[in-house]
Image (cartoon, rainbow, N blue to C red):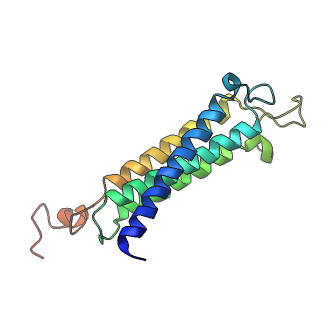
Amino acid sequence: MNKEKATQIRHTTTWLLFIVGLVLGSIALLADLLGLDFTPGFGMVQMLQLLVALTSLTVSGFIFLHDRRPPNTPRSLQADIGVRLAATGLVFCFVAGLSDLIGIGTHVPANEFERPFVGPLQLGGIVLGVVSILSGMLLYHTSRGARSSSSMKFLVNHGQESTE
């Protein structure tokens, strides 16, 4: 497979993931308006749709950011931290979103509630996860890029340009 074909497939995949994420997120958030809500309130099916949408948007965002980097440049420590921070944020979103379903939430059906529902703590957890994802993407995007060395070498040389 030639390089142009691989690039075309990557671009198509990125756009497909982005569109799937937008559609699933829109359906999950606007289910009441669209008449697709099977249960009152924001149910588990909607939460799962929202989490799959977040995953799809995160993956498409990182593929897009990776394509913007110069080819054959090594990833810096800052970029690695950004990827891991975003992945941690995504896991945090899943744990917060599905906390009642896995039994660690405050609205577990065995209590006085007849079914799990999304509460303010879950929404706060999802918001923190999304902030973590966006922070990771920002770290990844602002990392070394086309520079031949990291900014740490500049600091070690006391502000003098490296002669290498």
Residue drawn at x 42%, y 57% is 11
Q: Is residue 86 visible?
A: no
Residue drawn at x 62%, y 41% is 24
Furthest residue toward top:
33
> Along the horizontal axis of the image, is 33 left or right of 148?
right
Given residues 21 and 146, the one toward you in this image is 21
Q: Quadrant of residue 26?
A: top right
Residue drawn at x 49%, y 57% is 13
> Along the horizontal axis of the image, is 137 left or right of 52?
left
Residue 49: x %, y % from top left: 67, 42
Given residues 77 and 118, the one toward you in this image is 118
> Along the horizontal axis of the image, is 145 left or right of 6?
left
Residue 93: x %, y % from top left: 61, 45
Q: Can residue 62 be seen in this view?
A: yes
Decide: is 23 above or below 79. Answer: above
Given residues 45 and 112, the one toward you in this image is 45
Decide: is 71 above or below 95. Answer: below
Residue drawn at x 74%, y 30% is 36
Residue 150: x %, y % from top left: 25, 65
Residue 7: x %, y % from top left: 39, 65
